[in-house]
Amino acid sequence: MSAPAKKKRKLMFALGNEAVAEGALIAGCSFFAGYPITPSTEIMEIMAKRLPQTEDGVFLQMEDEIASMGACIGASLAGRKAMTATSGPGFSLMQEQIGYACMTETPLVLVNVMRGGASTGLPTNPGQGDVQQARWGAHGDHPIIVLSAGDVPECLTMTVTAFNFAEKYRTPVILLLDEVTAHTREKIEIPAPDEFQIFNRLVPSMPPEWYKPYEETVRGVPPMPPIGSGYRFHVTGLIHDKLGFPTSRPDEVKGLNERLFRKIDRFFHDIQLVDRYETEDCDHLVIAYGSVARSAKLAVRQARERGVKAGLLTLRTLFPFPRIHVEPLLRHCSKILVPELNMGQISREVKRVNNGRVQVRTINRVDGQIITPSQILKEIS
Amino acid sequence: MANVTQVIHKYLRHNKKFPLVFCPGCGHGIVLGSLVRSVDALNIPQDKVVVVAGIGCSGRIAAYVDFNTVHATHGRALTLATGIKMSNPELTVIAVMGDGDAFSIGGNHFIHAARRNVGVTALVLNNFIYGMTGGQCSSTTPFGAYSHTSPFGQLEKSFDIVDMARASGANGVFRESVFHAKRLDALLQKALSRPGFNLVEALTPCFTQYGRNNKFKTPVDMFSWLKKYAVPIEKYEKLENKDGYIPTGVFVEKEEPGLEARYAAMRDSLRAGKGGAA
Amino acid sequence: MTRKKKGKTKVTVYPAWCKGCGICAAFCPAKVLEMGPDGKARAVREEDCVNCGFCELHCPDFAISVEPADPEKNGKSAEDESPAEESALPAREHAGENQPG
Ligand SMILES: Cc1ncc(C[n+]2csc(CCOP(=O)(O)OP(=O)(O)O)c2C)c(N)n1
Ligand code: SF4
Ligand code: SF4
Ligand code: SF4
Ligand SMILES: [Mg+2]
């Protein structure tokens, strides 16, 4: 991802939310639609200012989050890279449209800055309560990619990654931040755009009459022409055949449902991103994500100083759950600790993968406060 | 006018199963015909036409026409249409919606799309009922009318779609019945060739779910009713007893630029360093 | 208003697409169309057709086409397609070169 093009780098003292906007622009985002909600609002305010200053950028403040998602889906169908950002209550409103985007294989990026609690909850405090909702919030069986970021530089790079995955796999990608990450101001170097590999969706190369919009391909991801480019086809949230028209023929229904999963499942090695810290020989493994991973890193360092063989696996991809990275570590660690700002949403994934092999403990903090390094250190030393 | 049937056939997707899924005498088919004829009359290339439909019997129209077609979610067609138009202002974007679609579940999107004056034509197929789900009342079901969810008569008042569009700031507001298909064609053509947000409300009979339960004996009865009661606004104004009559025709015709044009102008002026809104 | 010209058209009902709603038969000003025993519309008095175009525009299923029997001799426009609203029944305009699709 990064290369040494130092001279073009810009130093910035930025919020996590600002880094998200920066990342989106680097990734080629030219459409944003959203509805204000704490603690995500800065993202839309920056996009409101930046996008109209680009060649073809469009920013829209919509009437609600349902409309925001709808506009992003429309924009993406018209060939744009589109993003929306929200938080808890708004995320709930978006669910039906997320399912539609999955079914129609419409790439887009949705940033959800998680706040505390259910319902209106704790608007200005962090939480990680939307993790399972991100995976399962939309009705019906569907695959989806959920990423997370834990500090300001990661907010930028993971936003670029989110766009790349969305384009590559024709799927909505949800990027989860928590309030702390979004509102922490840190010094970051803004990498030059050419330091990133930017992925753009495949467009069909065959003549329009040969184009079958939902045809099986090697990767399972059919090419996607922008609306208006001469490839006329039908887009629907109904189960559809290879031409895009509704069907209830069992073989076609099965074919579509399975392809939707397969196009993601086959590429776990590409999609499941983690960061390993001192995990090679660790006995006591911490698995964390988001702002909690920062505290965990400090705790692991301190534990090592005390002679404890601690290690940290930071999850950048939450779903599909990075089993391939967790499983090998189970061979040499005897204890796993999963600290989270919820009552145990990723720990249940860890337990599922662990399948009773090693001891799994959790720290579940739901008082609107962050999990501190000392809280974690206490559990691993 | 060219051979009507031939024009229709030019734009139908022939690999789709015909006849249409609609019930016998459903007015939606006539609106479909009108839509196709209007696009043809205006010579808009098929590649540049986008039909975004909601969910309902009305939404089924999208699958039949050989344009760029998007069958969206219930009530949200206008949100997708907004995204498409703002992304590519060159396209002629038509949102085809039912009354439930556009004014019950999607009412908020409708008033905001009209207020934004985004360059989309909203074609609302008003049959006064939820057709697809089997005859429940919608926000346009008339006071006193029977439906499966108002078995003793609707106690709530209904929306007047034209009033809603006008009050929300739509650039163009039109209404016609499918009995007056040629006038519907003319209004639709007008709407499609104008800037900004334009509403065309098509009064379309649903005998199966509305008529039968409201004292109409056949689909033909419903057409006779429209023939008598859907009257041009000029005529309507002169009626002494307006009871039951529905005015049709042109209600609003403003020439304000669409949001997409305003946005492009703002972008241009920002890039030219003038820094202001359009 | 033009005078009506009868018998200049060919009225075809495509039974596979006709759903028998009866709209065409009910409103045809010249009583050209009737509902047959199979429940589908049929042209029983084609020679009386005044080429008003109503049936073709209003069949919700695109099951009727009205084409000029003699392509050269058509070309009058109808102001209003609703026949009963106007006493005179104007002929409809045709671009004669077209054949049914
Ligand atoms: C979110 C959601 N709620 C409910 C439905 C079920 N539903 C499908 S169509 C429809 C009503 C359709 O009525 P209308 O929009 O008037 O269209 P019509 O069928 O009358 O043309 C409803 C309630 C749905 N598809 N999605
Ligand atoms: S239920 Fe009503 S709206 Fe739906 S197809 Fe039948 S007649 Fe038309
Ligand atoms: S209007 Fe069409 S569908 Fe109805 S009876 Fe006549 S031909 Fe048949
Ligand atoms: S064109 Fe007019 S007169 Fe001729 S069959 Fe059709 S409705 Fe009757
Ligand atoms: Mg309806």
Image (spheres, rainbow, N blue to C red):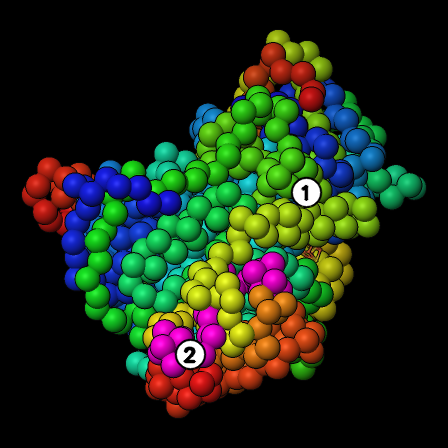
Q: Residue at x 8, y 41 (%)?
A: B273
Where is residue A214 drawn, in percent x and y?
64, 39
Task: Tell me which residue sits at (68%, 76%) in the image.
Answer: A357
Residue corresponding to mark 2: A307
Mark whose residue sits in front, 2 or 1 = 2
Which of the pair C21/C53 is nearer the observer? Answer: C21
- Of residue C80 and residue A125, the one placed in the foreground of this image is A125
Q: Residue furthest left?
A: B274
Q: Position of residue B186 (x, y in %)?
A: 46, 37
Verify whether residue A305 appears in magenta: yes
Residue A301 shows up from this direction: yes
Q: Is residue A67 left or right of residue A190?
A: right
- Nearest the viewer among C33 and A198 is A198
Q: Is residue A90 above or below residue A216?
A: below
Label 1 SS: loop
User: Which residue is the site of mark 1?
Assistant: A245
Which quadrant is the N terminus of chain B positioned in?
top right
Q: Residue at x 77, y 26 (%)?
A: C12
Residue A332, by quadrant, is bottom right
> What amino acid is labelled 1 in the image?
Phe
Stretch in magenta: A299-328
Residue B183 got which mark? none
Q: Amino acid at mark 2?
A: Gly
